[in-house]
Structure formats: C-alpha cells, structure tokens
Amino acid sequence: MTERHTLALLLENTAGSLSRVAGLFSARAYNIESLSVAPTEDPTISRMTVVTSGSPQIIDQIVKQLNKLIDVIVLVDLSDGLRVERELLLVKMRHDNDLEKDKILKAVGKLEGVLLDTTEGVYTAEITGSSAQLDEFVRLVDSSILELARSGTLGLQLGPKSLNSK
Amino acid sequence: MDEQLRGAEIFVKALADEGVEFLFGYPGGAVLHIYDEIFKQDKVKHILVRHEQGATHAADGYARACGRPGVVLVTSGPGATNAVTGIATAYMDSIPMVVFTGQVSTALIGNDAFQEVDCVGITRPCVKHNFLVQRVEDLAETIKKAFYVASTGRPGPVVVDLPKDVTAEVTSYSYPKTVTMRSYKPPVDGDPEQIHRACDLLLSAKKPMIYSGGGAVIGNASEELTKFARLLGYPVTNTLMGLGAYPGSDPQFVGMLGMHGTYEANMAMHHCDVLISIGARFDDRVTGDLEKFCPEAKIIHIDIDPASISKNVYVDVPIVGSVRSVLRELNQAIESSGRAPVDRATNLWWAQIKEWASIKCLDYDKTSKLIKPQSVIEALHKVTDGDAYITSDVGQHQMWAAQYYTFDKPRRWINSGGLGTMGFGLPAAVGVQLAFPDSVVACVTGEASFQMCIQELSTCLQYNLPIKVVSLNNRYMGMVRQWQEFFYESRYSNSYMDALPDFVKLAESYGHIGMRIDQPGDVVGALEEAFGLRDRLVVMDFITDQTENVYPMIAAGKGQHEMHLATDDRELA
C-alpha cells in the first residue's frame, strides 16, 4: 500500500534547517526519493520540496513529524490536490554515429528540451518535465549518457492557493 | 538607552530576568567568561555537580518536581557530550529544560579546535530544538526563545550553543518580555466537534477505560482528570509516567498498566469497548503486541502533540490540545449533556474488573527470611506517609517503586520512563530537594544504577541536601538477571555485580551516613531512623532476596491479556 507523496514546505532559512529535515528522515527510517531546497523571494525563508513514499500511516507520521520541527513554517501535501510538478535534468550524451545522434535529438525534442552545448561528439541538454517523463528519457538514451544531474521534483499547487497564504 | 553589556553579563542577567533560580553546571574553558559573571552576582544560584550528566538529571528532576524548566550550563566538547544522556532522557519524557553549552569561538568552529564538537549536530535528534548563537546581538532573544520553546506545547529540552567570543562581545541589553515565532504555534484548545464526539462515545460505553499518562502530570491536569473520572465512575489506569496524576489509593484506580502493570489494568485494557487515552503515547511497554492491543475498543486520544496520535495505534477520535484545557471542555460537555453513563452495563464491567483484581497479582511472599524488595517499598510508603518525592533509577527497583509506593499526588514520582537511564535517580533527587528543601525526598535505587552517578553524593554534601537513598541491593543488575532467567535459560551473562564497594563506608567517605540492613525485621526501624535524620543524607543499603522477580509481566511480543503472574512460577516451583 505504498503511496508516493510530494510535500512542499516553507522553512526558516537558517544554517541547521536542512539537516533537521534530512535528520528526521534518517532517524525515523522514512524514505526520501528527492529533496530540493532554495531560498524564496523572502531571503529568510526557504522552500523545500520532498518526494517521499510509504504507507498512508507512515505518510501521516511524516507530515506530522515535519510539522513538529520548530523551523517548519508551513507544510502542504501537494498530493492532496491539483498541482504542477516539474524536475530539471541536465544531461551530457555522447554520439558516435548518425543513428545515435538522431535517437538523442528525437528524445530531446519530444520533451521540448534545449541543447546547451554541441561540442564535437557530445550533446549537453536541458530538459524539464515530470519525474516520470525524465525517467523515460533517461531510459531511452541510457547507453549514450556520459553524466547527468537532476534537480529533484519541484511543485506548486494549482489555482489561487499558495503556501504563503496558508 | 539600553545597557551596554558583554555577552557573559547578558547571559547571567537574562537568566535572572527569566526567573531562573538554579543553574546546574560545571565550568570549563569555553564558558569561563560566563563563570566569571556568575561569581559576581547572587541572583542565579549555581549548583556545581561532579559530572555533566549529573547536571542535566538534576535540572530534569527539578523540572519534573516543580514544573519550571531546569537550566544547565556546561562547557564545550566533553562537557556537551557528557550532557547528552541527560538531554535525551528529558527529551523522551517531554521535560522542559534549557541546556547552555559552551562552544569554541566562531572563528575556530569547524577547525577541530581543542574541546570542539558539533554540539548542535550531536544533540539535534534528542532536543525539541537547538540554537547556535552567532552574534551577541541575538543572545538575549535566543535565550527567551529557548525558554519559550522548552516550556510550551509538548515540553522538551532546548540546547543553546554559545561560542566563547559571543560571550565576550558587547551589545545593548534588554530582555524581551514575550517572543513570537512564525514557525511555532503550540495548540491549546481541542476541536469542539471532536470533544462532542468523544463525549457521546464515552457516555455510550459499556466497558470503558481511562488510560492516562505523563501528559496529565506535565500538563498539570490532575484535578481535571480526577473530576473527569469521578463524573463518569469509570476505571482509571496510569502509565509509569502518569502515576500520581490520579490518586493511587482511589477505588476507581486499577493500578499501572503495561509490561509490569496489574493484571486487572491490563485485562481491562484488553477487553474494554471504549478507551480514552489522556496524554499517553501508546508506548511499546504499554501496548505489548500491537496486533493484539485493545481489539474491541473505539479509541479517543487527547494529546498536545499531533504526531503522538495514530503513531502506533489507530485512533477513532483524535483531540489535539492541552490535556487540561480539553478535559475541562470534556467535563463541561458531560455535565451539560444531561446524560449519565450506561449504569447496568458499567456495573457488570466493574464486577468483571473486581474478579480480575481478586487474584491479587501484586502479592508476594511475606514470610521470607530474606528482605523482599517489595516490602522495603511498602515500608517506605508507611514511614513517609506516602507523601515523599520518590526518584528512581532504572530496573527492578524502579518497577517495585512504581507498583508498591501508592502515589496520590502528581509530580511525586520522578523516573526515567522513556529512555530508561540508569544513574538518573540520585542527581534527579538533587534537583527535587533543591526545588523543595523542606520536603522528604527519597531515591529508590539499586547497587548497579546507584554507581552510575554516585559522584553526586559530593554535590549533595556541598549543598546540604538530606536525600534518603534507598538502595535495593541484590548483587545483580536485577532486571537484566530477570530477563536472562526467563528468556536465556538462566545464563547470567555479565549481570552479576562483582567486587561491590562497602556502601556504608562509601557514604561515610562522602561525609554522609551509611546503613546496611540485611534482616527483614530491621527494615521499618532502619527507615524510621534514617528519615528521622532530617538534615542528613543517608544511604540505606538493603540486602535483598537475589532471586526476586518483578511480577506480573507481559513478555515482549505478547498481548496485554497474556500476563505472566508470580503464581505461575510458584506453582511450577
């Protein structure tokens, strides 16, 4: 009965706040699929997106335990409503022949990715999409990949609601 | 204009402004500026312990007894790491405490400087919150925040790490009267709709059970709990942490529950149809096997910490709020409902409970030629009129104290329930005796636990604390020995306390009085003599029956209805 949930948090942008969240997940043996964090328009506040999985009872505990952290200002389980989730992929791919070139360009084109560098024999691309789309992309071009970096999922609720107004 | 002060001065002034009576501590390099300021004033009394663990337990005992946060000051590095056991102890039992740790100067942090540890990192998993003060300008407000966080909501320890240079720098000082934090808003009042649902469920119960825990003690809800139970006439059980929140001698009290709880309390839990948990957290030592826990019950749970609700056991009616406030509302709802409990059904229920109680699960052999540890606790109750503050260490003696010293008032039973920290009892008694200098304070311990913080006997002499140490000496780590007897075919691996000191001489060498009691007939007389010495600390070394076990017992993995009774073993023998 494992469910995947995307949690969005606003937290105090202090030195220890990221480790409090990360420490909670490891101390209580919760899963983290991805975690991304950066300051918001208010530099004293960071926004974090955590993708986690577990039984409904575990997810309930994760939400409650995160809310209990003194540095957490607000938390919304994005999976409860309409939302947009995106992840950024930077990927460097090698191509030795036209067939490979074609395969890569097609895959990049399908997700409306951008080629950032076309140095001889190598493509570096920037692609955004859902995590599932990026997984699919990686599967398609797997044999050509030299290296990649993924941002982890970011998410927003759709409609007028925001974490700031909660 | 505000005063211009050094950080160390601000620290001491802020504690005084916060109303701190005692600061339990031990000096060292990183906190010397602060100790110099402590020297120059007399508002905050510093209690010099002999080991930093003792400082934290003493502050913890103080907080448990009087309700105000305990305050600790230790140096960086080993000072901080020695304090960790005490911090974790307070964390597990939700005790308000503020621990100030020295730190190397900000410029040296991260350089593996002398006596440097990442104190914020080390303590993070065992504090409610912690702070590193990086600028002297933030010091006063951080201290205010630390006390606010420690003592509100579900209380807990807060660590404030103070780099040495911060205590030397100068800034203007004013202590904030209040503080608000956008990320911290502890709940108080329960949801009225949930309270209404709980009221309905309670009044329709046929086999109800009230299960209250440490939250009722810490949340000062004893009066409300007693009223609640009397309004309904339902049976009450307390957890180890909750003893005293409901009077132990009241006929509605069916004893402690859990691993070493009474047969009637555990059977009533197992068979009840409506369970209300009040400030208790369904700990594994209470529930036994979760699969078998309260199979027929609808469960109501009042707790100030939402994360405690439905953590281990699914709850039908969760109520988040302070136990005191929610019980007040609930009492009002019951009174104004115009309804009464289902009389006939609950009479049948009480008859069933009395039948369970009739096996007298706490009976023990009273004809033994050896001192039975249970008899010492019963005698202790008699000699102190049941009105002493009892601290304990961890093990068999702790369970016997919980079972046989009937606690009628909250905050009288002071033990490390969650973390189970041996060495807690004596330093905790230091804090209790300081909080209540005119009250009788006894530390029930065993020869193994006692030796874990025995150095605090020196602290007791320095501050003239007339604590009575009641040591149940069975020459074993008794609870370990008991488990080895039950579950490891009596292979007593490393549980025998060989090479014990002479505790009488040891007490005397610390400047106290020591007594050794090895005859059952001498127990009461010795206790009377010791407690008659109102101004002296007495260590009573009771040489007890080595083979005695704590009964009843729910073995790990068993349900609450599957208790192992003393008579099971006697019949086998």
Image (tube, helix red, strand yellow):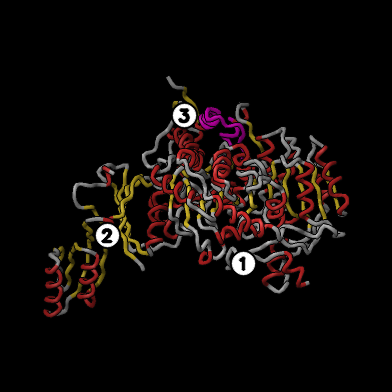
* Circle 1 or circle 3, nearest the eye: 1
Write down the residue under mark 1: B562
Write down the residue under mark 2: A153
Residue type, label 1: Glu
User: Circles 1 and 3: CB distance less than 8 Å?
Assistant: no
Magenta span: predominant SS is helix
Residue type, label 3: Val
Q: Chain of mark 2?
A: A
* Circle 1 or circle 2, nearest the eye: 1
At x 75% / y 58%, what residue is drawn? B363
Q: Secondary structure at mark 3?
A: strand
* Circle 3 or circle 2, nearest the eye: 2
B519 with respect to B288 (left or right): right
Q: Residue furthest front?
A: B344
Q: Chain of mark 1?
A: B
Write down the residue under mark 3: B170
Q: Secondary structure at mark 1?
A: loop
The crowd level at tag 1 (other Cα within 10 Å; few <14, some 14-19, many 20+) is some
